[in-house]
Image (cartoon, grey):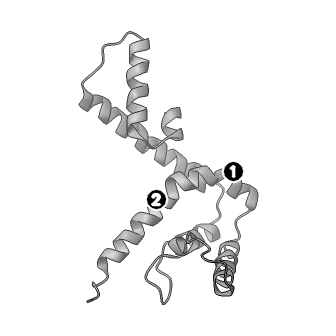
Amino acid sequence: MPLALQTTQGMVLAHAVANELRARRILLPTVALIEKMCAIALTRAEREAFRRLTSGLTDKHRAALDAVLLVRPGGSSSILSWFRQPPGAPSANAVLAHLARLRAVRALDLASPYIRCQKSRFERCVAPQGNRKDGRVRSRRPQRRR
């Protein structure tokens, strides 16, 4: 599981499992069984990463982070995807929009050492969750006619 905590790529994990079994001189099981073992390890690693990510959060922080996954008022995407937008061209409006995103992130009131410590886990685990959530929200919107 230590390798599963470092990567989300199933093939990397499968190669590591096969290499470890060969090093211990154990016959390799079927591909389906190795695949299942890797899926279980990745699921456990994801749960462990989420547990580590959220262990230091208060109820106030949890509620604020849950709200980040909601669709912005007057918008069509989540607040998380709004946070992740690039700054854009160097113009006054782009700078103002970037400052608005910065103020919104700071309003979450998460301690910066906690953020620095958890950044890689966040990028690997939480950000994809936000992307999947956005996709579900977009799929429910009616399609515009062109």
Horizontal and vertical percent for residue 82? 54, 75
Residue 11 or residue 49, whichever sits in front: 11
Residue 50 or residue 105, whichever sits in front: 105
Quick check: 74 above or below 35?
below
Residue under pointer 1: 117
* Residue sitting at x 50%, y 82%: 72
Quick check: 110 above or below 20?
below
* Residue sitting at x 64%, y 82%: 94
**Which amino acid, by three-letter code, is at mark 2?**
Pro
From the viewer's perspective, tell me whether residue 11 is left or right of residue 64.
left
Q: Say the numbered circle drawn on residue 140.
A: none
From the viewer's perspective, tell me whether residue 122 is left or right of residue 47.
right
The crowding category of the residue bearing disc 1, from other C-alpha atoms within 10 Å (few below 14, some 14 to 19, many at least 20), is few
Horizontal and vertical percent for residue 4? 48, 37
Location of residue 54 by image quarter: bottom right
Quick check: 55 above or below 137?
above
Which numbered disc, 2 or 1, marks the residue closer to the eye? 2
Circle nearer the N terminus (2, 1)? 1
Q: Residue furthest front?
A: 90
* Residue sitting at x 59%, y 73%: 64
Location of residue 137 by image quarter: bottom left
* Residue sitting at x 70%, y 65%: 110
For the image, the number of numbered tags is: 2
Residue under pointer 2: 128
The crowding category of the residue bearing disc 2, from other C-alpha atoms within 10 Å (few below 14, some 14 to 19, many at least 20), is few
Question: Which element type, helix, strand or loop, lies under badge 1?
Answer: helix
Badges 2 and 1: C-beta atoms under 8 Å apart?
no
**Which amino acid, by three-letter code, is at mark 1?**
Cys
Quick check: 55 above or below 77?
above
Question: Which element type, helix, strand or loop, lies under badge 2?
Answer: helix
Horizontal and vertical percent for residue 45? 48, 42
